[in-house]
Amino acid sequence: MSKIIDQAVIAADNDKLAADLKADYAVLGEQLSRRGIAIDDIKAQASAFAVALPSWGVGTGGTRFARFAGKGEPRNVFDKVQDCGVIHQLVTITPTVSPHLPWDKATDYQELRQHAAAFGLNFDCVNSNTFQDQKGQEHSYKFGSLSHADAATRQQAVDHNIECIEIGKALGAKALTVWVGDGSNFPGQQHFARAFDRYLDSNRKIYAALPDDWQMFLEHKMFEPAFYSTVLQDWGSSYLAATQLGEKAKCLVDLGHHAPNVNIEMIVARLAAFGRLAGFHFNDSKYGDDDLDSGSINPYQLFLIFNELVDAAERKLAGFKPEYMLDQSHNVTDPIESLMNSAVEVQRAYAQALLVDRMALAGYQDGNDALQATRTLKQAYLTDVSPILAMARLERGGAIDPVAAYRASGYRARVAAERPAVASSGGGIV
Ligand code: LRH
Ligand code: MN
Ligand code: MN
């Protein structure tokens, strides 16, 4: 396997930090053992954790106002995969890349697959894109795609999704994620029921093209780009659509796609209970679909989501096998650094959730001891599991401090010299 970052650079950085890490790990192990928890068990589970990288996340995102390009922006999907390889080498928990089409179109998908394999990467869920018009496209998505009033436009969107499945098959993916921006900007603009019927009808055609071992993930979003109504606006509509389509259809939860203050962990519990939780697009938000780095605004919410996930896993709920993916947009940071940090934050929430004393919690819940119940969650959340995560990375050949090792490697400067600078650009605002 080709290692993009010189392993000696990682080793040199690790050498500086290893003694302190060992001491911190021992102290934490001692504390956890007093709570009846074996630290090595938690480390083993955290080590087995994985979250997929969004191919589109390694480039600088930008807003509708402007995009300030970074240095060494990936030129194509091969560069994106290489950047993902760097992330995986350092954090060791991002072994898959979720591609977005047509952004990631290539001429030879076997070559792309081999390129990824060289970095120890495979491909995860394929994302379709009918929220933008592409060059030379016959019908515009200005007024929708899968739910468009015009049959030819809907068919074009269906055909694109079927092409995504074909490309996904070549890449070894096993799921298609469908998010549409379809909706309306004015009351009265769209007939809610007819638009949803058309959406379902188009999805049935896509569903029919799914291979037996594939799943279809429906991603809902409350608003944006449509600002009055969205066809698949919440988990309720998503659940309805999934049950209409069949067993292979599930609901994907993007953390940024809910109204402010919505109890996302409860949505997770509901979808898991009824076997329809597809998985996640992890990110964080303060106002809307901000696509901020995971855990940067509301880490407690992330923990509470994982609390539900760990609980569902322990109860062995039928059909429970959520896929974890990041979906972020980086405007002011080096995307590689943000994605490394976010992957670790998601893993952190998982490790913290593993520490919840579930027996005690159930007792407090049944005894209506609200205070002790919530303290039980807080005890797990307030445990600093950093030494567990760092030790897991070290043992897997990764970096104790991924950002420090990445900076020491000079990777960004190296690719900046190879990849021509991209001009910053204005957004869609005049
Ligand atoms: C929509 C979304 C969806 C898209 C991605 C680029 O807001 O979350 O997942 O595919 O952003
Ligand atoms: Mn998303
Ligand atoms: Mn989004």
Image (cartoon, rainbow, N blue to C red):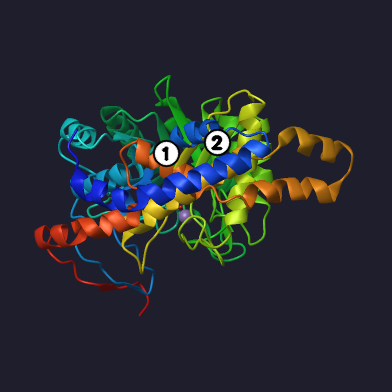
Image-quadrant location for residue 354: top right
Q: Which residue is mark 2?
A: 39
Helix, strand or loop at label 2? It is helix
Q: CA distance from mark 2 to mark 1?
A: 11 Å
Q: Position of residue 407 (x, y in %)?
A: 26, 60
Left or right: residue 139 compared with residue 1: right
- What label does residue 306 carry, if any? none
Image-quadrant location for residue 276: top right
User: Which residue is found at the position 16% from the left and 62% from the top?
Assistant: 413
Question: Is residue 238 depicted above or below 411 in this figure?
Answer: above
Left or right: residue 106 compared with residue 233: left
Q: Are marks 2 and 1 in contact (CB under 8 Å)?
A: no
Residue 8: tell me if it is visible. yes
Q: Residue furthest bottom?
A: 430
Q: 219 or 324, which is in the foreground?
A: 324
Which kind of residue does numbered mark 1 sit on?
Answer: Ala
Q: Which residue is mark 1?
A: 392
Q: Quadrant of the N terminus?
A: top left
